[in-house]
Every structure is written in C-alpha cells, then in structure tokens.
Image: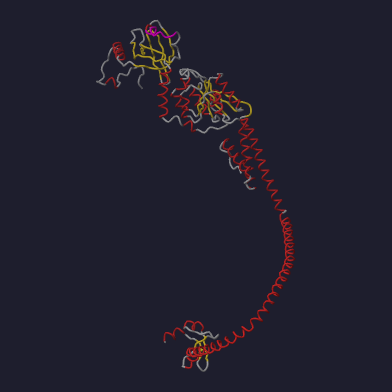
Amino acid sequence: MLSERPESYEAAVARLEAIIARLDSGDAELRETLALCVEAKGLIQFCKGELDAVSGELRELKLDELVAELDAPPGDAA
Amino acid sequence: MTDPAQPRLDLPEERDPRLPGPFGVGRWAAGFRDFLRERQRVLLIGEVTNFRRARASAYFELRDSDGAVPCAIWTSDLDRLGLPEGALRDGSEVIVAGGPDFYPGTATASPSFSFRVSYLRLAGEGDLLARLAALQAQLEADGLFAPQKLLPRPAIPKTIGVVTARNSAACADLLAGLERRGWRGTIVWADAPVQDRRAAGAIAAALRDLALIPQVEVAVVCRGGGSLTDLWAFCDEALCRTVALLRLPVISAVGHESDRTLIDDVSAVCCSTPTHAANEAVRVNVGAARADLLAGASSAVRAASVAVASRGRRLAELAGGPGRSLRSERARLHQMLREVRASSTRGYFERGRLAARHGLVLSRKAAVATAAERTGRSTLSRLGRATEARMAQSMQQERRRLEALAVTERAHDPERTLERGYALVAADDGAPVTSAATARKRGRVVLRFADDAVGARIERGEDVEREA
C-alpha cells in the first residue's frame, strides 16, 4: 500500500520497476500481488502527475517582475 | 542649546599638545605628494573603465569586483607603448606599472589623487590563467567546490531559473534543448550582462533572487563561447562564493567545451553547451518517460492478471482433485486385483507341478530305502546288541550319581533346617521374605515352622529392630 508520497520521481520509478520485477517473477503470493498492484497504481499516478506538470504549455516569467511583486508591500496589488 | 553657527573650538584633538602644526595646507599637500611618490612602484591588473584622453594625459579607472583606482598616463608614454588602435578602451583587461601620485592643486585648481602609470599592456591569457589558478586554489581550500554538488536536484523540475543575456544564441539553444526533452514547465528568465565588469555582480544578484523564489528548483547560468577575457566575469571571486553557498542548485554552461571558468568548479554541474545544460536540468526525457510509464502500467496490470488467473486455474485444479484421485485410486486397485488373481492361478498350477515332482522323488527315495532296509537289517541287530550292553553300563553309573546328588540336596533342604528349630518367613502369596524392609513393607507374613505355619503381623518394625 502506498502510505506516503514518494521522495522523488526517480525513487517512484525505481520502486515501480522493483514491483514489476517482483510481479513478473511470479513468486509473490496472491495477497502480496494485490498489495503490490495497489502500490504500483499509486506510484503510476504520482509519476503521471509529475509528467503532466511539465507537459502543458511552456510558461515564461521574468525575474524582475517576480522580484517587484515580492518587494511590493502587501495591499499594493489591489 | 548650542548655537550651530558658533564654531566649536574645544575639540579634544586641538587641545592635544602632541599634535604638530598648524601647517600651511599647500606646503603640506606638496609634502604629501612627495610622500606618495616615494611609495614602492607596483603592477596592478584590472579592467579599464571610463577611459578618456586629454591633451597631456589619458585618464581611466582600473577596476575589479573589489574596488578601483583612478589612473593617469602621460600621452607621450601612452603613444610610446605602440598599442593597436582601439585596444585600450572600456572593458579592456590591462596590467599597469606605476605608483601613487598626488596633484596638490593650486589656489584655483582642485587637487587630485591618481595612480601614475608609466607602463601598460593588455592582460594576456597567461596573466588571467595565473589569476584563475590562484583563485581556484583559494576557493578549493575554502571547501567551496563541494556544497553545490551535495544539493538534491529533481529529475523533472517544474520551474527552472535561467540567468543569461536574453535573446542570445545560448538562450535559444537552451530552449531548444528543453523542448527536445519534451519539457514544458515554467521558466523564470533572469536577464543579466554576461561580459563586462558589471556582469559578475548582476549574475550573483539574479541567482540570489532566484533562490528566494521557492518554486524555482534549479538555476541555469549560460553564455556562449569567448576568450578568457570575455568570460572573465564567470571567474569573479564574489560570484563564485555566492554560487557555492546558494541553496539552489546551479548548472553552469559558460563558453564552449574547451572554455573553463571558475563558476564551473563551484556549481552543481558544469556543462559544455546550453543543450547539455538542458539535459542536466531535466534529466528525464518527459516524452520517453511517459511511454515507459504506460508500459510499466501495462506490465503491472498484465502481471496482476496473470497472477490472479494462474491462481484461479490452480484453485480449479485443486477443487477437482478429490474425484480425480478417487478414480485413479480405484483403477489402481482394479489393476492390483487382476494381478493378484493372475498370480494365484499361476501359483496353483505351479504348486501342482511341484507336488507331482515331489511325489516322484519320494517314491524313488522309498524304493531306495526298502532296498537299504533289507541290506542293513543284519547290521542293525549286531549293532543293537553292542548298544544294549553299553546302555546298561551307563544306567548303572547314572543311578549312582543320582543317589549322591540326593544326599547333597537333602543337606540343603529347608525342611531339614526347620526340623532343627528355624522358622521360614513367607508372604501371604508364599514368596519368601528375606529382609526386614520387605517384612515392613508387606505388613503381614507367614511363619513356617517344622510342624505348621502361623500368620504374623509386622508391628512398629523399626522400633522392634531398634530394641533388638
């Protein structure tokens, strides 16, 4: 069972590969197989989310403008 | 309240009797000039800024990231150097020889300080490399090469900060590299000069600002190729110290493959080209990763299906197992029965044949025995007589031996002992009681005398024994 968010994309992919190897080996018992499938599903969702986050439109911002926003005292935006 | 217009004449220094003077300022200024001119002559290296040529002298400031000195050179000295036209201009990295000088001014002209240059040459690669090596050794000794390399870098950052000259070729290469990676996240552009004396400070400031934006996960500093002089801003000590201590991982992509700047040493990763930097910034090819993920998902689903299906089959096999076992067991029993029957029939005939053969052998033996009896009868009668004599003799000897044994036995007969006044202790069941312990254990005993037997009970056996 995926109890917590993976540390990183690489960690999630590495764990996913280990799960698939375990499932492919056929050594896992039924209970373990089902638990691994649930964990794999969570990892796939996480990885998909990471990929989706950088697969839309390229967004370009200017540092000067961001810094100006940061420097502006609260309430200035209004 | 004191009147601000009223000069204060009671300064502690003025009252100090050790202070010499007051002197005439002009004379003191001339003395100061002489004092400076006696200073040791030195070589300085720095960047020329604000260069201007007047009739008698050329003036400029020699500057680096730590400070500046106003310089002056006699136009006659400058012309004698034979520098190429336009070589000495703002931005030139030069080495000057000279010493401090002071113009004391006049009653109407302002005084000024300057470094009087008597010799000047453009700094060569060798000069810069020597400075680079010294700086490199210093930064390494301060342990500044390692910190950036220890920072964690996400494989797929969502936001990348880029410090570069906007619209440069390097900038376009970086964008193309990111596009090839299939990466379309957020870029925060930090425009900065990448060549003049303001570059190092501007780049350091941009990096510090990027580090303040929590969404920025990695920064790329990039610039196209150039001479070491052109790239000198990226060897700036203050910039390198800033990069080294930044919590934001910095990827440097300055110059071409052969170019080497100090920022390369202190950054998390040093790349030879902007394309290489794009690959390091986004270490996973997003398109390929998506395909891999799809394959992984299919693989997991397939493996799970196979696991469930194979176990289903096994369960079905197990469920049909008892009936199948019973059938096979029944068939096996039938087979064994057939074999037993066949074997018994075969045995019956075998035994019949064996009995007939035994009969034949016995009848032959009987015939042989009859013949032997006839021939042996006379021998037997002769032997019989000898045997009878031998047996009579043996019988006599045996009888005598028995009589001797009877005498001996009588001597050991307990009845004879009883006749002499002893009694025999036995248990109820007739078993002899031969020890006090057994008697105590039994409780009841039988005392056999020569004439009769009487029952007795063992009482307080231990006391009796002690009294005895």
Residue lying farthest to the top in this orientation: B55
Q: Is residue A67 magenta?
A: no
Quadrant position of the C terminus of chain B in the picture: bottom left
| Vertical relation: A66 (above or below) B370 | above
Q: Quadrant of the N terminus of chain B?
A: top left
Residue B274 placement (x, y as % from top left): 54, 23
Residue B233's x, y, as percent? 46, 20
Nearer-the-camera pick, B101 or B327: B327
Q: Is residue B429 left or right of residue B26?
A: right
Residue B343 visible in the shown view: yes
Visible residue check, residue A78 = no
B43 and A18: which is toward the camera: A18
Image coords of residue B22 (percent x, y): 27, 15
Place residue B110 in its image quadrant: top left
Left or right: where does residue B73 sit relative to residue B172? Answer: left
Residue furthest left in the image: B17
Residue at image point 48% right, 25% down: B264
Image coloring type: secondary structure
Q: Position of residue B267 (x, y in %)?
A: 48, 28
Depth check, front residue: B367 or B356:
B367
Query: Measured along the vertical axis of the image, is residue B327 above or below residue B122?
Result: below
Taking the spot 60% from the left edge, 39% from the top edge, the residue there is A17
Q: Which residues are magenta?
A: B77-84
